[in-house]
Amino acid sequence: MRTLGVAILGLFVGLAVGFLVFSELVGRLAARDGQVDAPWTFVIGFGPQLLAVAGAVVAVLIDQRRRNR
């Protein structure tokens, strides 16, 4: 049950970091010429979700390492 809680916490933290990082990226790309090109739209669209999954995985790995000490 603890692992599930840590995974959910990591998911939300990763999602928050993803929104912060990719909103900054959108701001910088749009400020340059007023629009965002096609390859960047794909990265920006799926970036927060990928960071959320990565956050969940990293949180579980950190929790298991701390438990094994």
Image (cartoon, helix red, strand yellow):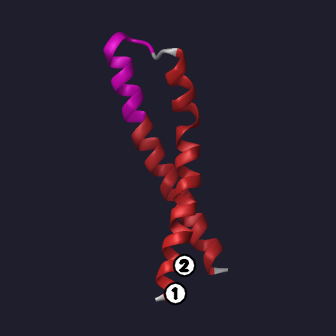
Q: Is residue 34 magenta?
A: yes
Q: What residue do we see at 50% from left, 54% from top?
A: 14
* Residue 31 sits inside the magenta stretch: yes
Q: Is residue 35 above or below residue 21?
A: above
Give the vertical position of 6 relative to 40 (above or below): below
Q: Residue furthest top?
A: 33
Quarter containing the N terminus: bottom right
Instruction: Specify start and end residues of the magenta stretch as a single range.
Output: 23-35
Q: Return the x and y of residue 56 as percentages of the image width and height.
A: 57, 61
Q: How many marks?
A: 2
Tell me the element at label 2. Answer: helix
Q: Are marks 1 and 2 in contact (CB under 8 Å)?
A: yes
Q: Amino acid at mark 2?
A: Gln
**Residue in view at x 54 percent, y 16 percent:** 38
Main SS category, magenta section? helix
Q: Which mark is residue 64?
A: 2
Neighbor class of circle 2 (other Cα within 10 Å; few <14, some 14-19, many 20+) is few
Say which residue appears at 37% left-offset and 34% top-offset: 24
Spot occupied by residue 31 in the image (x, y as percentages of width and height): 33, 18
Q: Which mark is residue 68?
A: 1
Q: Position of residue 48 (x, y in %)?
A: 53, 42
Q: Amino acid at mark 1?
A: Asn
Q: What secondary structure is found at the residue carrying circle 1?
A: helix
Q: Please tell me whether residue 32 is drawn above or below residue 47 in the rendered image.
A: above
Left or right placement of residue 3 versus residue 36 in this view:
right
Q: Residue at x 40, y 41 (%)?
A: 21
**Disc 1 to disc 2, C-alpha distance:** 6 Å
Check disc 1: other Cα within 10 Å, few if <14, some if 14-19, many if 20+: few
